[in-house]
Image (spheres, rainbow, N blue to C red):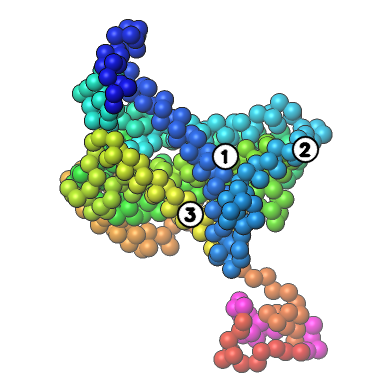
Amino acid sequence: MPALMGLENLTQYLPSWVAPTPAFCQIVTGMLVILVMLHVILGGCAYGIMLERKLSAWMQDRVGPNRVGPAGLLQPIADGLKFIMKEEYTPRGADKVLFMIAPTLIMIPAMISFAIVPWGGTLELSQLPFGLAKMLGVEGITVRLAGAVVNVGMIYLLAVASLGVYGVALGGWASNSKFSFLGGLRASAQMISYEIPMGLALLCVVLTAGTLDPYAIIEAQSHGNGMWNLLQHPVAAVLFYTCMLAESNRAPFDLAEAESELVGGYHTEYSSMRFAMFFLAEYFHMITGAAFFSVLFLGGWSLNPFGGSLDLPMQGGLPIVLAQVGVMLGKVTFMVAFAMAIRWTLPRFRFDQLMKLAWEGMIPTALVMLLITAVFTYLGWASSIWAGSLLCVAVMYLVGPMLPHQKNPNHRIGMIGSRFSPLVEGTGSVSSHPVAMSDAAIPDRRQGLQSIH
């Protein structure tokens, strides 16, 4: 470009502390990635709400929002204006300080957890167009497209994810409302419980890859010895995705805000932008969780589920890196839409069923899967870990019924005079007829007489 001809030695005008060293270039790249992706995810939260409303409308044979703007595309802006114009309300008797900072405490962990997500591979700055590499003095330098490049990125994920419970618990407790308080207690128990199988499922991937570095985990799935971890670790993938839904309080795990018994749960007393922050945090958690799931189990920006050389390279120029970012965003969008489809498909768990699923189902399964993964890795069978997942399913199928279980709370209680406990005519006592003893919702006609009056 002629306009840049006189700027070939731009570095001579810069102070010494901004010399284009690899470390400085990585810091600048990380800041740019954080700045760009923060706004991309915030925009994704706004239009994710519209996407969910559209998906639910399609699944229920409705139209969905289509009035504000062309095809309803300005609906998120209208929703934001509505939240801003609503009245801010603080209930009497609430702890005002904690009540005000609780939405912030739930939003901050959601906004900082994506910092280690590798949105693209390694960018070769020497391939920048228009001679920018020579002009900036960055020839031969490579940078990674992540907010923070740390070798223990998965530890950071678990540490930050565990902080989200504070905003929910404090918001419920500080509201001085029994519904909010019970919602906060539910959320605390739920998040703490489901962090355990999530961590164990993550450990299965870490053991297989032999590293905590997100980039190395992606490379092991695309150009390493194995395939995507979704194929190698299907059990761990199901456990991790289920825990991701529970951690973000998404249906069918939204017991903390069950309107049927708790009105709105921990955010019942919140209004205006304070409520909007709780709402945005849920979608932020969902988008970030989908990004981590894509990194751990879908090969990141990999296009070939079976690995090998027919895939996007880990390193390249700007076109390659932009293609990698596009693949990552596509996978994240698909996983978010899948979570929305689950919400409008499955009914909500009862709370005792929710806890039973974690402690009696997912945690034992995750422990067995971790043990099998450790044995396979030690024996050098990491490329055949999918067989270990099948073994885990077989073991839980055979051993699961022998484990201690909670007493079934769903047995039917007979009511005198009902069709399940009919009265014996003239005696006032309950009949011992097979129909009366049956727990079936609709008694089988082969049992004989259907009612005794």
Q: Which residue is mark 1?
A: 281
Instruction: Kindly identify the amino acid type of the residue bearing the numbered disc 1.
Output: Ala
Q: Which residues are magenta?
A: 425-441
Secondary structure mostly seen in magenta is loop
Q: Check contact, mark 1 vs mark 3: CB within 8 A.
A: no
The image quadrant where one finds the C terminus is bottom right
Magenta-colored stretch includes residue 440: yes
Q: Measuring from the top left, give residue 24's x and y in whole percent.
A: 33, 18
Q: Measuring from the top left, give residue 54's x and y in whole percent.
A: 56, 58
Q: Which circle's residue, 2 or 1, is located before the other in the chain?
A: 2
In the image, farthest residue toward the top: 16
Q: Nearer the viewer, mark 2 or mark 1?
A: 2
Question: Local crowd at mark 3 within 10 Å, few (<14), some, or many (≥20)?
Answer: some
The image quadrant where one finds the N terminus is top left
Instruction: Kindly identify the amino acid type of the residue bearing the numbered disc 3.
Output: Ala
Q: Quick check: 407 above or below 114?
A: below
Residue drawn at (25%, 52%), measured in percent from left and top?
Answer: 304
Instruction: Kindly identify the amino acid type of the residue bearing the numbered disc 2.
Output: Glu
Residue drawn at (31%, 43%), measured in percent from left and top?
Answer: 323
Tell me which corner region of the image, top left, top right, bottom left or bottom right, holds residue 132. top left
Badge 1 marks a residue whose secondary structure is helix
Does residue 372 appear in the picture of this structure?
no
Q: Which residue is mark 3?
A: 337
Q: Which residue is mark 2?
A: 87
